Image: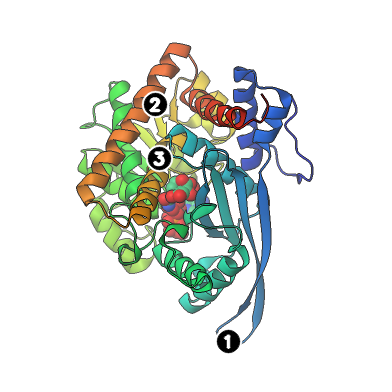
Amino acid sequence: MSLITAGETHHAATSPLDAARHQLREAAEHLGLSEPEARALATPRRELTVTIPLRRDDGSLENFTGYRVQHNLSRGPAKGGIRYSPMVNIDEVRALAMWMTWKCALLNVPYGGAKGGVTIDPRAYSTAELERVTRRYTSEISHFIGPDRDIPAPDIGTDEQTMAWMLDTFSVAAGHTVLGVVTGKPLELGGSRGRASATSHGLGHITLAALGSLRLDTATATAAIQGFGKVGRDAALFLADAGLNIVAVSDQYGAIHNNAGIDVAALAAHVDATGSVTGFPAADPLPAEQLLELEVTVIIPAAVEGVLTAENAPRVRAPLIVEGANGPTTPEADAILEARGTTVVPDILANAGGVLVSYFEWVQGNQAYWWTEEDVAQRLRSQMLAAWNYLSQRSSRDHRSLRRTATAVAVERVARAHRLRGLYP
Ligand SMILES: NC(=O)C1=CN([C@@H]2O[C@H](COP(=O)(O)OP(=O)(O)OC[C@H]3O[C@@H](n4cnc5c(N)ncnc54)[C@H](OP(=O)(O)O)[C@@H]3O)[C@@H](O)[C@H]2O)C=CC1
Ligand SMILES: O=C(O)CCC(=O)C(=O)O
């Protein structure tokens, strides 16, 4: 079955978009979807590309390209983060938007999927410049987003301050404060307790559940974490609190390793002071590419896509990989890891805690009533574990990998929504 869409650009065999389409094709074949149904699911519903001029602090002018892709709207408003990175391109945003659709369907939150991004290295610009870029980007996409249409949130290179600027820009144009237009906001502007750590804590709950189902003892388990940003840092803290020994951590500047275990709170303080995990005195430097190949119990990729490939997958020694990042494992690596018996907990389940608590934030904002930290934490834990239990049982029953099971469950739910709404009867 062909799922190639008109206007598609050329890219390497393992691009995120190829990976996302490969996973969809596999699920569509498994579910016996018709060619038009599969094609509709492979194609973004709407896409917007915008140019963002920036007057720099020194008076010079630069232009950036921004995107917002709404992959699917059938189960509710589109939902997904905004990424600021020099690597952002339309095909990456399309892939990330598709994964959001499956993630929301899998967790049964009433959203479709979207993603946005600006091709910019946020580290190279001042806070004032980033504010101007964010406000202009928000103005350019303002007719495309909204609490009932499409609700952005943070992703790589963005944070709650970015969301506050987006909220303000959108609200000024609307003439009143629109709390529901973004999630991942500061608490003072209608954010939810527990959203900042939600992706990491959800990942932590899933990691502990997966260790349990593999009969691996948390007291002796070791972990290597790629990425020490919003997701990786709190995941490391959560898992260290749960008794795991975090033996390696990396960021884009390099990796560090200590077989006796890294003091994660001390490492967080070092990163706050220096901007990088490198140079942490209580660990040794490690060639970054070796982190994924360490002899540890669990690997948590929590940075970017496509880091587990056909090239390095044969050297992975951990029995368990829990995907904090979106799309860290290429389909070729997936096949190798599956054949070698490595358990891979897929992104659309493992990192879904973020969008789950974003949904809680949107619900709280719509009701103008805010829950306690305990309410959020308890609902996050129970809904993540319910999704894990459902998937792991179904995966064992059907002898299909967790990723193939998760994708098929999600695709089936979205396809069913299409059919109920009258498409493809
Ligand atoms: N934030 C969220 O709620 C959610 C995020 N995700 C996904 O999690 C992943 C991380 O996002 P998030 O933590 O928010 O982003 P951040 O920007 O907060 O952090 C990204 C981290 O990855 C590091 N990094 C970037 N490139 C590399 C590399 N090549 N090797 C090692 N580390 C690298 C960065 O290093 P440095 O610090 O040096 O820049 C940083 O530590 C992404 O795939 C994102 O889509 C998924 C669900 C929700
Ligand atoms: O919180 C959200 O709405 C989306 C988070 C996100 O971008 C993701 O799950 O990849």
Q: In this view, does 153 lie to the left or right of 144?
A: left
Please give the residue where the numbered disc 2 appears in the rendered image. Answer: 319
The quarter of the rendered structure image containing the N terminus is top right
Judged from this view, the residue extending furthest toward the bottom is 59
Residue ID at (48%, 55%):
147
Q: Residues within 10 Å of mark 1 (few under 14, many from 20)?
A: few
Q: Which mark is residue 58?
A: 1
Residue 26 picture location, percent across and down: 62, 24
| Mark earlier in primary sequence (2, 1) | 1
Residue 151 picture location, percent across and down: 50, 54
Judged from this view, the residue extending furthest toward the right is 6
Residue ID at (49%, 44%):
289
Q: What residue type is labelled 3?
A: Ile
Q: Which amino acid does label 1 sit on?
A: Asp
| Mark earlier in primary sequence (3, 2) | 3
Please give the residue where the numbered disc 3 appears in the rendered image. Answer: 300
Q: In the image, is residue 158 above or below residue 113?
A: below
Q: In the image, is residue 16 above or below residue 196?
A: above
Query: What whole-number distance in Å separates the C-alpha atoms at marks 3 and 2?
Result: 12 Å
* Most foreground residue, 33 or 315: 33
Disc 3 residue: CB within 8 Å of ligand 1 = no
Q: How are the colours assigned in the image? A: rainbow
